[in-house]
Amino acid sequence: MKNIQMGSMTPSPEVCVRCKGRLWCGPKCFILERYETRQKTVLSIRKRDLQSEAPPGVFVGWTGYPKISLSPMAPAFSTKDSWMTDDTDKWFGMPAEKIIGFRESLVRGSMPVDVYKARDPSYQISEIQETLMAKKPVDVEMKLKSVPTARGLSFSDFHAPMGPSADLSEFRMTENPSINPEIDYLVSDTDVKAKDAMVELFDAEVGVNQLHKILSAGMLGVKKNRKFVPTRWSIVSIDSNLSEHFIDEKIKYFTKIDDVRLFHSSYLENYYYILLLPREWSYELMEVWKPGASWNIEGKEPTFMSDHETYEGRHSYAENTAGGYYAVRIALAEYLNRVQRQATAIVFREIGDAGTPSLGVFKCRETARDALKKIPLSFETLDLALEYLETKLTIPLKYWVKQSTLLDNFYHQKRLTDFS
């Protein structure tokens, strides 16, 4: 699990010679915008009582599992649209500094809970859960045991950055929320399995971001099995279960595409090239972290990671590419389900060297989604597609080919149709 805790630092009035005024250029360099946002946040929460329009949002920690922290979140000061501060489904295209500004403004009120208390929630927990079913921001009041502290943002490959926090004394809604009826129905149904509820809610256009919060808060599944789910696990679970459903129940029954397709998009120093081949379903994600990238700051050489699955699927967690594997897979599943075709997918991800911090796995999902919304380049053969791709990748293609299991299979594994 890749996490960085950035402590507070005294800002320099000079612009960094490396980033030339960018938000981030590594673990020891920040520019002034971040401190201006933090100062505004901290000054606005000198009191221990916070009344605000909540996104709605919640963060569930994983340290000490099954004794963990449940943390509702609310902005420290008024915003035009508080929902945006915790809706990763709508962040694509926003600059990193805007997203970091969102997160620095969100205060977490943390309370210790046992994960199994989700089955029999207290009144206060029920209030927190109810806000997560809302269709729009909800007015709430948080009473904290101390003034929130801003020790620095916590960055993660899985979830969005975390800002100021304090222990929670009391949480309550100060208005009746406008509840999404589809969510209300499936949360109330304590006999439906969690995966079935996820699929039904997704089909009802409940976004991935809201789904993982509902799952985190222990609101889905058979009553005796309900429990709080750490946020980093719930995000992966939603991406994994939804994509698995569409692949196994629909995509494997579609006819194969009849050409080689190449899609591309980039965002936050992430460059995705998605290659679809006219074969049965299989999938591989390859990543390369350039020297100077956020997880390869001190490296001299590119760092490769990869995971793949065949038609039979995966039987273990994608340890190398982690949550990004499932985030891209759901984007692929959405596309293939939309066009009602089956394909082998090989994904090339290059992570840039500007040192932009990881703002969560949403960037993988949303960049892949953006790529797959575009009209692809079409090629008659894989060789032609790779010849073109070699002109676009900054890491020579020979290194990718050496890394790839599925490209090796494509060129060297004989199939029955090869003898017909």
Image (cartoon, rainbow, N blue to C red):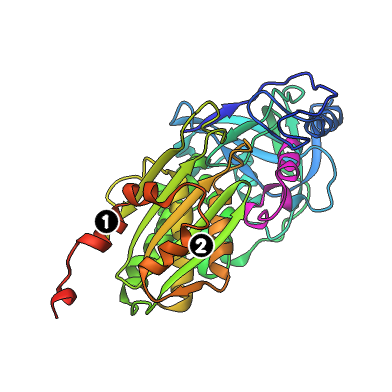
Range of residues picked out in magenta? 84-104
Query: Which SS does the magenta portion mostly show?
Result: helix
Residue in the picture at 81% in, 34% down? 33
* C-alpha distance separating marks 2 and 1: 45 Å
Query: Which-is-in-front pick, marks 2 and 1?
Result: 1
Seen from the viewer's position, the closer of residues 21 and 240 is: 21
Report x, y in % for residue 375.
Answer: 56, 74
Which mark identifies residue 408?
1
Which one is nearer the viewer's eye here, 81 or 39?
A: 39
Image side of residue 307 versus residue 268, left or right:
left
The x, y position of residue 392, in whole percent, is 53, 57
State which tag comes first along the sequence, 2 or 1: 2
In the rendered image, which residue does mark 2 sit on? Answer: 186
Residue at x 17% of width, y 74% of height? 418
Splitting the image into 4 quarters, where does residue 373 fall?
bottom right
Task: Please state if 229 lies on the left or on the right of 316 as rendered.
Answer: right
Query: Would you place residue 19 above or below residue 5 in this image?
Result: below
Q: The residue tagged with tag 1: helix, strand or loop?
A: helix
Describe the element under mark 2 as helix, strand or loop: helix
Q: Inspect this view and state whether residue 103 appears.
A: yes
Q: Position of residue 284 (x, y in %)?
A: 36, 55
User: In the rendered structure, does residue 94 fall within the stretch colored magenta?
Assistant: yes
Quadrant of residue 127 within the rendered picture: top right
